[in-house]
Amino acid sequence: MRNVNVTNFRKDIYKLLENAIKYNEPINISTKNGNAVVLSEDDYNSLMETLYIESIPNLKEELLERANSQEEDFVSEDEVEW
């Protein structure tokens, strides 16, 4: 995470935002009243999706269990009636 004070953030806003977007580098902006964090939209969406998945009881465990399943435990998509 990149740490910067608000004055330097204002001075280098374009470069800092480009790095947040291009390299997924969060920015911690410090002010005299507290701090704020800037994330790329991709990072934000990923975080929100993770929180959503974590909020569904037993979903995480089920996904991990299925990820470790053998290929023969699954049905081919050709066998599924759509």
Image (cartoon, rainbow, N blue to C red):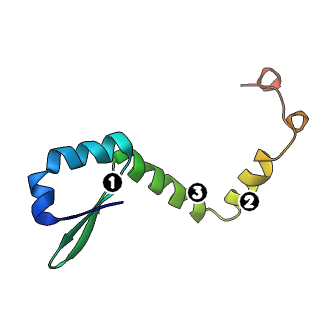
What label does residue 61 carry, if any? Answer: 2
Mark closer to the observer (2, 1): 1
User: What is the x, y in percent for residue 17?
Assistant: 23, 47
The C terminus lies in which quarter of the figure?
top right
What label does residue 39 carry, if any? Answer: 1
- Residue 19 lies, with reference to residue 36, above or below; the image says above
**Quarter of the image where one finds residue 70:** top right
Image side of residue 30 versus residue 82, left or right: left
Q: CA distance from mark 3 to mark 2?
A: 11 Å
Foreground pick, 42 / 53: 42
Q: Please tell me whether mark 1 sits on a helix, a strand or a loop.
A: loop
Circle 2 crowding by C-alpha within 10 Å: few under 14, some 14–19, many from 20: few
Q: Which residue is mark 3?
A: 53
Of the image marks 3 and 2, the number of the one nearer the N terminus:
3
Name the residue located 57 percent from the left edge and 64 percent from the top edge. 55
Image side of residue 42 versus residue 65, left or right: left
**Quarter of the image where one finds residue 60:** bottom right
In the image, what residue type sits under mark 1?
Answer: Leu
Of the image marks 3 and 1, the number of the one nearer the N terminus:
1
Of the image marks 2 and 1, the number of the one nearer the N terminus:
1
Name the residue located 84 percent from the left edge and 31 percent from the top edge. 75
Residue placed farthest to the bottom in the image?
Answer: 33
Number of callouts in the render?
3
Name the residue located 24 percent from the left edge and 72 percent from the top edge. 35
- Residue 82 lies, with reference to residue 23, above or below; the image says above
- Residue 58 lies, with reference to residue 18, above or below; the image says below
Name the residue located 41 percent from the left edge and 50 percent from the top edge. 43
